[in-house]
Amino acid sequence: MRSCGCAHGPPWVTRGPPRLLLTTGVIYIFEVRRPDNREVPVRTARSFNAQPLPVRLLLVNQLGVNLGFYMVVPYLAVHLEADAGFSLAAVGVVLGVRNLSQQGLFLVGGTLSDRFGPRGVIIAGCLLRAAGFGLFALTPSLPLLLTASVVSGAAGALFNPAVRAYVAESAGDGKVEAFALFNLFANAGMCLGPLVGSALAMLDFRIGAATAAVLFAALALAQAVALPAHRPAPAPSTVLGGWRNAFADRRFMAFTLATAALFALQNQLYLLLPTAAVEATGTEWSTAAVFGAATVATVAFQVRATDWFRRRRSPTASIAIGMGLIGAAFLPPLAAPVDEPGLRLAAVLLSALVLSVGVMIAQPFVLERVADTAPAGLTGTYFGVYYLLSGLLAALGTAAAGLVADRAGTAASWLCCAALGLASAAAVARGTRNTVRTS
């Protein structure tokens, strides 16, 4: 199998009806064979086909979720300030309420997934996101915007832990491969969303918000029709008992704190790196180069990298190596000469590539570890606790990076981020006993 983007394909393409797979939502995969009749490997498509039906549906759903989200949120602040005339303080309140609603309710979403099954929670989350973005498309007033922020934030708190719990429970022993594909689809959505959103924002931000609302409504309908019902395992205790179980799990809490830097540093792809790219070139287009480099790396190498590390390294060692690369990703800009814009941009793009490689190595194994640590019936709760704590720490880390950049200069922020990633790698590596896993 190989993807074929030309009209007729290479001479050894077999004729006949093509087989369409949604590997990234936009790529056609055709079954082809070499002259010796051996199938050409396409790891992403093969891995996608090997997943159970619920996982495949949720992968496509995640592509749509990120596509819709990044069509709207990156342009919300500009719309509120430039078009609607709100003050920066009011814009900050609206954005802060949305983030707080999502981060603060992750535990609730995970618990609902455990108690009532993830399918209904996922559908409810998509419907709430559709309602929230639909409100953003209306004539803005502060009460309306705050309502939209709460609704859209609560939506993310519902379906984020529920989707991951459903993927983990459906994939069985293939969780790490499923989460590798999950990361790939999520990144594809993050790349396509701003492109679509920028085109719609040139017409009117409200058109983009309304389009995203329709997309989330369509996703909810698709999940209601096609996503199989999933009966949750019996909860071992009450809701409060499940929460106590998660927060009292010392091994889980230590792992959560050690790997929270993953999300704090991944967020710098949307803060520190684009800012540095614009400072280097003086043009906004360089931010697209940063996002493009990160997305191309993930789409091209995610499945291959996960497969390699799964066969040759333990999960703990893989996470430690990934976190080490994430920390090292913030060092190249420190070596770039200030008076060479081209070299400065090259250093930022190198940082984006290395950061993406580190994330693609570590993240599938991190999600696998969370699922494996959770007792039966508490998978959603554990994901909720993990995203609650790591999200709060990521928000603090992002704010701290911005504060350090304002007070001590960008170089200090690069150093802080590098130190945080390397410290996280060291903390994770302490649990490593044998870094080689037999195939």
Image (cartoon, rainbow, N blue to C red):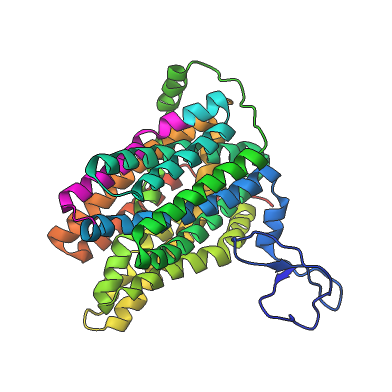
Q: x, y (%) of residue 15?
A: 84, 74
Q: Is residue 276 visible?
A: yes
Q: x, y (%) of residue 223?
A: 61, 42
Q: Is residue 102 magenta?
A: yes
- Assign the magenta stretch its main secondary structure: helix
Can you say whether 264 is above or below 269 in the image?
Answer: above
* Farthest-out residue, front: 139
- Residue at x 61% of width, y 45% of height: 222
Tell me where residue 8 sits by quadrant.
bottom right
In terms of depth relative to the viewer, which is nearer, 62 or 352?
62
Which quarter shows the N terminus?
A: bottom right
- Residue at x 36% of width, y 77% of height: 346
- Residue at x 64% of width, y 54% of height: 311
Tell me where residue 377 sits by quadrant.
top right
Q: Which residues are magenta?
A: 84-109
- Residue at x 22% of width, y 44% of height: 93
Q: x, y (%) of residue 269?
A: 36, 61
Q: Is residue 251 visible?
A: no
Can you say whether 361 is above or below 120 in the image?
Answer: below
Q: Does 99 sit left or right of 402 as displayed?
A: right
Q: Is residue 318 magenta?
A: no
